[in-house]
């Protein structure tokens, strides 16, 4: 995230730089093949968007979790240094998350999911201060 790193071309991860270095069908291209952290329904999105549908999830969602919904939103905002460095935050993303959670609570499908329980909701954000 430093300006010196960006000047040296290091503003992106090593895997991204290696991926861009080789032509699309090169045998040297590095791609993630299996994802061990996310359920298949979630991994399906980045697999389609970034991996030409080749990324495979090794976790199947247990039926015991019941019905749930997964929603992705794209937000344009600016990353800034948080009050607690070295972390960052993006106020536009935080505002969007807040609006979506409020909308979800207000429009909760009680007939399908039962009573609204915010403790059962999971919101993922890239920066810890943004969660606050």
Image (spheres, rainbow, N blue to C red):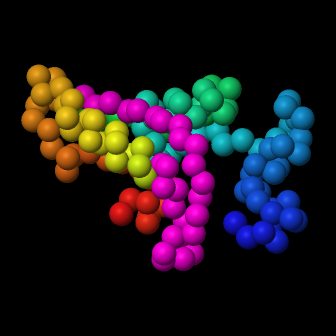
Q: Is residue 113 above or below residue 83?
A: above
Where is residue 107 drawn, in percent x and y? 21, 29
Front position in the image: 82 or 118: 82
Q: Is residue 27 magenta?
A: no
Where is residue 118 drawn, in percent x and y? 20, 47
Front position in the image: 80 or 121: 80
Residue 56 appears in the picture as rendered: no
Q: Is residue 76 magenta?
A: yes
Q: Viewed as shown, does residue 74 lie left or right of 3?
A: left
Q: Viewed as shown, does residue 105 lie left or right of 19?
A: left
Where is residue 101 drawn, in percent x and y? 30, 42
Quarter holding the N terminus is bottom right
Q: Viewed as shown, does residue 86 lie left or right of 29?
A: left
Task: Write the residue at 76% across / 49% down.
Answer: 16
Is most of the magenta stretch helix, strand or loop?
loop
Q: Quadrant of residue 112?
A: top left
The part of the chain drawn in magenta is 67-93
Residue 26 appears in the picture as rendered: yes
Front position in the image: 70 or 62: 70
Task: Write the residue at 34% across / 42% down.
Answer: 99
Where is residue 9 drawn, in percent x and y? 85, 60
Task: Write the residue at 90% across / 35% down.
Answer: 23
Quarter holding the C terminus is bottom left
């Amino acid at each position: 995230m430093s300006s010196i790193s960006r000047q040296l071309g290091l503003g992106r991860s090593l895997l991204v730089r290696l991926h861009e270095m080789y032509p699309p069908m090169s045998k040297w291209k590095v791609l993630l093949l299996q994802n061990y952290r996310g359920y298949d329904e979630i991994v399906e999105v980045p697999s389609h968007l970034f991996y030409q549908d080749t990324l495979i999830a090794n976790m199947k969602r247990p039926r015991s979790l019941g019905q749930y919904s997964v929603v992705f939103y794209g937000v344009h905002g600016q990353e800034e240094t948080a009050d607690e460095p070295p972390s960052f935050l993006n106020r536009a993303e935080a505002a969007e998350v807040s609006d979506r959670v409020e909308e979800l609570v207000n429009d909760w499908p009680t007939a399908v999911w039962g009573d609204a329980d915010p403790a059962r909701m999971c919101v993922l954000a890239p920066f810890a201060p943004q969660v606050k």
